[in-house]
Amino acid sequence: MFEPVKNTRVYEKVVEQIKDMIIKGTLKKGDKLPTERELAERLGVSRTSIREAIRALEVIGLVESRQGSGNFIRESFKDILLEPLSMMFILEKSNPKEILELREVLELQTVVLASHNINEEEIVKLKTLIEEMLKCSDENISVELDKEFHYTIAKASHNRLIINVLEVLSYLIDKFIKDSRKNILADKSNREKLNHNHENIFKALECRDSIKARISMEEHFKLIKENFTE
Amino acid sequence: MFEPVKNTRVYEKVVEQIKDMIIKGTLKKGDKLPTERELAERLGVSRTSIREAIRALEVIGLVESRQGSGNFIRESFKDILLEPLSMMFILEKSNPKEILELREVLELQTVVLASHNINEEEIVKLKTLIEEMLKCSDENISVELDKEFHYTIAKASHNRLIINVLEVLSYLIDKFIKDSRKNILADKSNREKLNHNHENIFKALECRDSIKARISMEEHFKLIKENFTE
């Protein structure tokens, strides 16, 4: 399970060993890491090196330190991907339009996958969300329902990579496009159009009609892009 | 530019300050960081904390340490995204089919974007690559030409986020689907079909025909999926 470590860049080797344990399945999501002392003994390195390695893993978002109870492998991938994607976004001097475009690229095809893979439970969930959106007059709640609608479609793709990437993208949009969703919903005629879009997407998914699903999603993004102001 | 730091988790604060400098544009891609001593003085923290912070930034792939010349902000985003995406892939126990599916989702729509945004230079580049692929009999070179062809289409989207994400995905595929590309190319009739696919994609892009471009890319992925073995 563990191999003693010999190298100048000791903490890197420790990071690699912990990653190896993840790759081999010895450590899984939510698992507790051995204590710093145990790790130091088993790997034959100083506790300082262990601490450096754990801090590095914390920064990647792979490990979470819980006060008093130790270090754990994280459960959520938002944390693993959000930071690096945000940094890439900033260093590339990307504009918010590019995030929106990436989201469009992903969602137009994810809805096609969803139309093949959606199950009854997810259809019921979408139906409920649409009914709630129609009744809802509170903008903040509308925004949350809208997000949930798109997230449910992503989940219906039944591809965990796509679900995670779209979830992170949704956070990126919230982070870099201030009030992006609210701005669209503020206009009453937009709200009606959006509700209509959502209904069309839902109907297409209910009939497992991939072509209609894609076209409805295209119309939806057309509206979003028309209302996008930088 | 710098604010003195007071906290128990000192290294995290240092990481945040360096990130802030990136966000504000004080530090850009390829820039050299101040020396550890300078940073320690300016931020009013110990050199140990600075070293921890820099190591953490190295692990994220944001900073690169060059022996003898100091610490630099990285130029490439492959390094920033590859590790977290790999870890997500492993922790989610994703199967290689999911990576391929994510790539398909992205490429089917990226080729549509490319058909709108491609420039003359990129068209010439694709034409050259197709001619080289037709002539090429070496499998390893064929694999590289194939990758370059898809990468050029990604670049023709003129969206840097999409370019970076597809590039990382390409590395993930190489990492987790052993010989994925070679396996397809080993069969002569597949090679001919692939060349034909590539030509159709190219012709559609040359005419800026987004519908044909997408259909040709769909056919291309159909072939890839038929030849995919886990």
Image (tube, coloured by chain):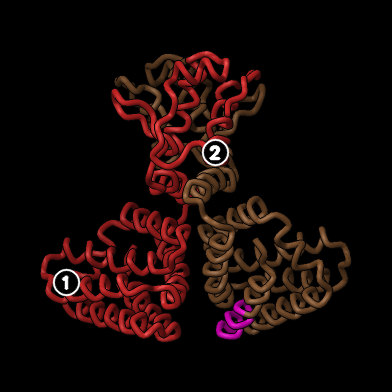
Chain colours: A brown, B red
Q: Is disc 1 placed on a helix, strand or loop?
A: helix
Q: Amino acid at mark 2?
A: Gly
The spot of residue B48 in percent (x, y) is 48, 15
Between residues B19 and B148, which one lies in front from this camera angle?
Answer: B19
Q: Splitting the image into 4 quarters, where does residue B31 fall?
A: top left
From the viewer's perspective, tell me whether residue B129 is left or right of residue B161. left
Indicate whether B10 appears above or below A57: above
Q: Chain of mark 2?
A: A
Q: Residue at x 45, y 16 (%)?
A: B37
Q: CA distance from mark 1 to mark 2?
A: 43 Å
Asked if one can make out residue A62 in the rendered structure from this viewpoint, the answer is: no
Asked if one can make out residue A45 in the rendered structure from this viewpoint, the answer is: yes
From the viewer's perspective, tell me whether residue A61 is left or right of residue B85. right
**Disc assigned to residue B132:** 1
Q: Residue at x 77, y 75 (%)?
A: A190
* Quadrant position of the C terminus of chain A in the picture: bottom right
The spot of residue B104 in percent (x, y) is 43, 69
Between residues A20 and B213, which one lies in front from this camera angle?
Answer: B213
**Disc assigned to residue A102:** none
Residue linked to disc 2: A61
Was residue B129 drawn as part of the magenta stretch in this picture?
Answer: no
The spot of residue A77 in percent (x, y) is 56, 47
Which stretch is magenta?
A209-218
Q: Splitting the image into 4 quarters, where does residue A42 fall?
A: top left
Between residues A203 and A134, which one lies in front from this camera angle?
Answer: A134
Q: Chain of mark 1?
A: B
Q: Is disc 2 placed on a helix, strand or loop?
A: loop
Indicate whether A48 appears above or below A170: above
Indicate whether A49 appears above or below A147: above
